[in-house]
Image (cartoon, rainbow, N blue to C red):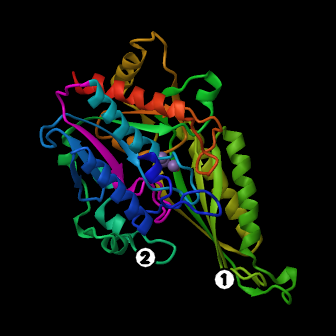
Amino acid sequence: MWRELLPLGRHPASGGYRRFAWSGVDGDCRAWFQEQARARGLTYETDRNGNQWAWLGDPAAGDAVVTGSHLDSVPDGGAFDGPLGVVSAFAALDELRGRGTRFTRPLAIVNFGDEEGARFGLACVGSRLTAGQLTREQAHRLTDGEGVTLPRAMEAAGYDPDAIGPDPERLARIGAFVELHVEQGRALDLSGDRVGIASAIWPHGRWRFDFRGEANHAGTTRLADRRDPMLSYAETVLAARREAELAGAVATFGKIAVEPNGVNAIPSLVRGWLDSRAADQDSLDAVVAGVEKAAGEYAAAHGVDLAVVRESFTPVVEFDHALRDELARILGKDTGLTVPVLGTGAGHDAGILSGSIPTAMLFVRNPTGVSHSPAESATEDDCVAGVLALADVLEGLART
Ligand code: GLV
Ligand code: MN
Ligand code: MN
Ligand code: MN
């Protein structure tokens, strides 16, 4: 099953994955999911927001135990971020069927749409819509770099964009959601553990900085006469690094758009996206305020106009304590070992859903610690340990 998924959307030059929401490759990944559900005799459905579900038991019965993750990727992402959680979900179900486990609660596997936000700029669109954290109107305004809106992209992929919106009835039928994910750091590698449990997700967000100057000839415009937005942008990148260091936070300008984008033209516009995250809200606020202030000063110094727009924000997430303790109890039951509990700076659908239903996460060791890059990794043995841990958790939850 992993082998069939591996070639989908893999870029031959970088070796990374380009699985953007509602693209042809995303459709291939969705077809793969549907086939996995069919092959296991599970009840397959897509919800009003395009998320895919595969049910064992009656979807209407309520108090379901749900697991899964996402199949989309960042530009040139790794093989594991997202798919490991979906593949492990199917593998854990196979394991439990092999054990002859009888469930007293319905079980579902989910593939949430557009988790990374690589195409439309907003992460976790599928889960945000479901949880009512994104309105239909807001979603309809999302536009990709080519000017294609989310509704047009969904329509082209065969989905009805007018159906999207909050799905409280669906959430009400879920008793617990557990997402397995590759660790995006080296805490488990350092502690020598294969699997960990998530405690919290840092508050995080994305801010767009538009520096507008004046396009002009690169050869004939005297330095003194320029209104060059690239200079204020470059200084702002350095300020973000400084502010993040001061606050013990992280800040990244990882995406940029330049107009007119010619080698021999001074830019008229430099648009940079700041991604910043911190362990606590005050530190994050301090970083963003510091970067905005610095950017304003640099823009003024270069005769450039600045506009800053907060494109998305997710407050701190504390995963459900009772569910977390239950996972720790289930995983430590036979070995007596304590499973490490880790915080993370990465966003997940589980974080979005945690506002509505009891939610937990399992992390699988990543020896490189690298993620959102082809260098992301996990050994086969650790992936198997993750599947067995997930199977134990599902068995522990769905039999009670
Ligand atoms: C998504 O993986 C994010 O945390 O940016
Ligand atoms: Mn990711
Ligand atoms: Mn992910
Ligand atoms: Mn993520």
**Residue plotted at (42% across, 68% down):** 24
Prevailing secondary structure class for the magenta stretch in the rendered image = loop
User: What residue did someone put label 1 on?
Assistant: 260
Work out whether residue 382 or residue 353 is closer to the camera in this orientation and state it: 382
Instruction: Label 1, secondary structure: give it.
Output: loop
**Residue plotted at (31% across, 35% down):** 93
| Amino acid type, callout 1 | Pro
Q: Position of residue 224 (x, y in %)?
A: 86, 80
| Amino acid type, callout 2 | Val
Work out whether residue 292 or residue 237 is closer to the camera in this orientation and state it: 237
Ligand 1 has an atom within 8 Å of the beta carbon of the residue at disc 1: no
- In the image, which is nearer the foreground, mark 1 or mark 2? 2
| Residue 267 sits above or below residue 282 on the image | below
Ligand 1 has an atom within 8 Å of the beta carbon of the residue at disc 2: no
CA separation in Å, label 1 and label 2: 20 Å
- Residue 94 falls within the magenta-colored stretch: no
User: What residue did someone put label 2 on?
Assistant: 148
Instruction: Label 2, secondary structure: give it.
Output: loop
Closer to the N terminus: mark 1 or mark 2? 2
Decide if residue 80 is on the left or right side of residue 94.
Answer: right
Are the residues at dot 1 and dot 2 in contact (C-beta closer than 8 Å)?
A: no
**Bounds of the magenta span?**
100-128
If the image is split into quadrants, where does the C terminus sit?
A: top left
**Res 135 seen here:** yes
Q: Position of residue 202 (x, y in %)?
A: 52, 39
**Residue plotted at (41% across, 19% down):** 331
Tell me, for residue 170, which label it has, or none: none
- Residue 122 falls within the magenta-colored stretch: yes
